[in-house]
Amino acid sequence: MAAPRIHVAASFPVGGDVVLPENAARHVALVLRLREGAPLTLFDGAGIEASAVLSEVGRKRVVAQIEAVREGRGESPLSVHLGQAISKGDRMDYAIQKAVELGVAAVTPLYVEHGDVRLKGDREARKLAHWQGVAASACEQCGRAVVPPVHPPQTLTAWLAARDETLRLVLHPATDDNWCQRDTIDTAALLIGPEGGLSDTEIEAARSAGFQPLTLGPRILRTETAPVVALTLLQHHFGDL
């Protein structure tokens, strides 16, 4: 059985100890029920992994001793920035979780015309922290050592203005599929709209920003399903699937 993987934003001195933060300690001690001597893998979220063994497991304190450090694996050669219209409930969690599993490099939640979620102040900060936690948990599961950033929510206009990726795609019906005939690329931007779809004005703005339309077949996909399918296509054509 593989050792559990735990995200800990810390340095990993070989032979030294790392005190796990509260949430990670609770997960190790109370959920996984690990005891002293159990092996585990720690990763710092920036690309470094460490083999470790638990040296102390208490109700309020969990300590791991670092045995070896290495560069993490699991990063795709294709860097995809996902612009995802914010959706309600756990649908946004699902989109972020699966995007991370499929190697996304960054996620920006977007406010769009037909979106029905508007976050402000403390509520936006709490939601952003939650989404970043979803990304970290997905990395624990899928073997990535780099936790992709979930950027603060912004308007579609602001996000489009900052895009300079080699390939830019917006989910929208199209007959032109020349995007998948391109040579190897290393950066891409993917724009996914809300349940009601992007407005005609937003589609035109995306196309003016260099985005090509991308069709995902004859069936209408939910907003949390669309990035899974689109990212799979991109990773197949230009990444590591």
Image: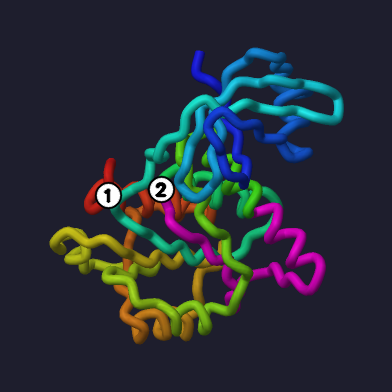
Q: Is residue 217 left or right of residue 6?
A: left
The residue lying at 73 percent from left, 29 percent from top is: 27
In the rendered image, residue 209, in percent from the top left (x then y), is placed at 36, 83
Q: Name the residue under label 2.
A: 103
Work out whether residue 119 can be spotted. Answer: yes
Q: Can residue 203 be found in the magenta stretch?
A: no
- The answer to which of 57 and 28 lies nearer the viewer is 57
- Percent x, y of residue 82: 46, 62
Name the amino acid type tagged 1.
Answer: Gly
Residue 239's label in the rendered image is 1
Is 154 left, or right, of 24 in this rendering? Answer: left
State yes or no: discs 2 and 1 in contact (Cβ < 8 Å).
yes
Amino acid type at image mark 2: Gly
Estimate how packed mark 2 is, as few (under 14), some (14 to 19) or many (20 or more) residues with alpha carbons within 10 Å. many
Q: Is residue 114 magenta?
A: yes
Q: Distance between the residues labelled 2 and 1?
A: 9 Å
The magenta segment is 104-131
Q: Which residue lies furthest to the front in this view?
A: 15
Question: Taking 58 as reference, is 210 above or below it?
Answer: below
Residue lying at 74% horizontally and 67% vertically, measured from the top left = 124
Q: What colour scheme was applied to this rendering of the protein?
A: rainbow
Q: What element carries label 2?
A: loop
Q: Please identify the quarter of the rendering in which residue 87 is found.
A: bottom right
Q: Is residue 91 above or below residue 108?
A: above
